[in-house]
Amino acid sequence: MRRYAISVAAVTLSLSLAACGSGQGTDDGGDLADPNDITIGLLMPEKKIARYELFDFPMFQAKVEELTEDKGKVRYANANGDQAEQNRQMRAMVEDEIDIIVVDPVDAKKVAPEVTNAKEAGIPVIAYDRLAEGPVDAYVSFDNTVVGEVQGRSLAEAAPGGKIVMMNGSPADPNAAMFKEGAKGELTGQDVVKEYDTDGWDPEQARKNMAEAIEAVGAEEIDGVLSANDGMAGGVVAALKAAGVTDMPPITGQDADLEAVQRIITGEQYMTVYKPYPNEAEAAAEMAVAKVRGHDIQFDALTRDSVSSPTHKDIPAALVPVVELTRDNIKKTIVADGIHTVDDICTPKLQAACQAAKLL
């Protein structure tokens, strides 16, 4: 049986380059008077998914500072789920003539005109986590089909032949379609009795949809829930509790949110997909700095994969492996990576559960 749990140390090794920050490449910084004095725009899509504010932005910023001797600047903006606002943020960065933009779009299609606008102004664009349409120069993310495969396989093993509710992500997010495709490829022996797409990855909408599924199918008839991320998994758990369920069916997730990890400890959630954010954020920072400096060799070394969007083919990409996270490997993954500490996870109410999970 294939397994997708991959050593985080090995992932980090595969993304690191000895040349980072060393000035190696096809030139010595092009026309830059000081190759460390650069400004990078970083646009994140929303705040309902906690990782962007807690991990991606600070990790990206720290790597840029490391690579530029603390001279590089990151101009950060979060659209809070509003693509029109993200378009305004991106347009303002273009008007201010910053050096490069890294964008994780709210809506991959609707951001395309701003990507084109940036390119016409001579500003490169790197798509981050979600593949923006338009003429992006590169893409860094995880293998999103594999994310769905990990979720689907895990649920298939936990609920063989069972009745499954699928709580998919936002239709505006191209990753959601890949998660769904990957998961369905693994749920071949299961009966998907209800399936929902969730605008904006909204946990409250997921709760309402799960309540509707419970009403239609019956709580006792649901053997598992394929939730595409942890926020929605929280909504699923809330709906099941409201229906009187005390012994939760296996529920999947994604992002390794603190609340989800705590639910895994207590048995309310079965698993989550941990995406090593340091590797993704640092790879994006390295790519952005190399692109601005004109270090083509370094940039090419960081983008050894390729992907295609509906508008452009063969986009240079870096796809970071993911990890299946269960009670058994919490300490050697998210704790070892500094994502969450044992003290954060093991609140006083969870001491007994943490001891059973061998975290204490």
Image (cartoon, helix red, strand yellow):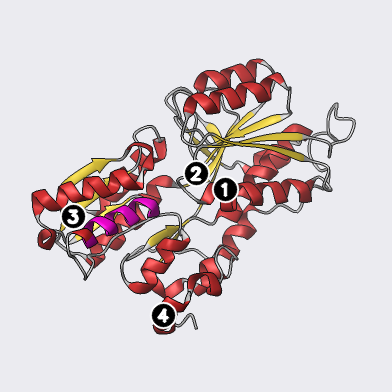
Mark 3 neighbour density, 10 Å: few (under 14) some (14–19) many (20 or more): many
Task: For marks 3 and 2, give the CA distance.
Answer: 29 Å
Q: Tag 4, which secondary structure?
A: loop
Task: For marks 1 and 2, give the CA distance.
Answer: 7 Å
Tell me which label, 1 or 2, sits earlier in the chain. 2
Mark yes or no: residue 214 visible. yes
Tell me if label 1 and label 2 are in contact, CB under 8 Å: yes
Along the line of sight, which residue is nearer the eye, 293 or 235?
Answer: 235
Q: Which residues are magenta?
A: 230-241
Q: Tag 3, which secondary structure?
A: strand
- Dot 4 amino acid type: Ala
Task: For marks 4 and 1, give the CA distance.
Answer: 28 Å
What residue is pinned by disc 3?
164
Mark 4 neighbour density, 10 Å: few (under 14) some (14–19) many (20 or more): some
- Dot 3 amino acid type: Ile
Residue 47 - label: 2
Magenta-drawn stretch contains 236: yes
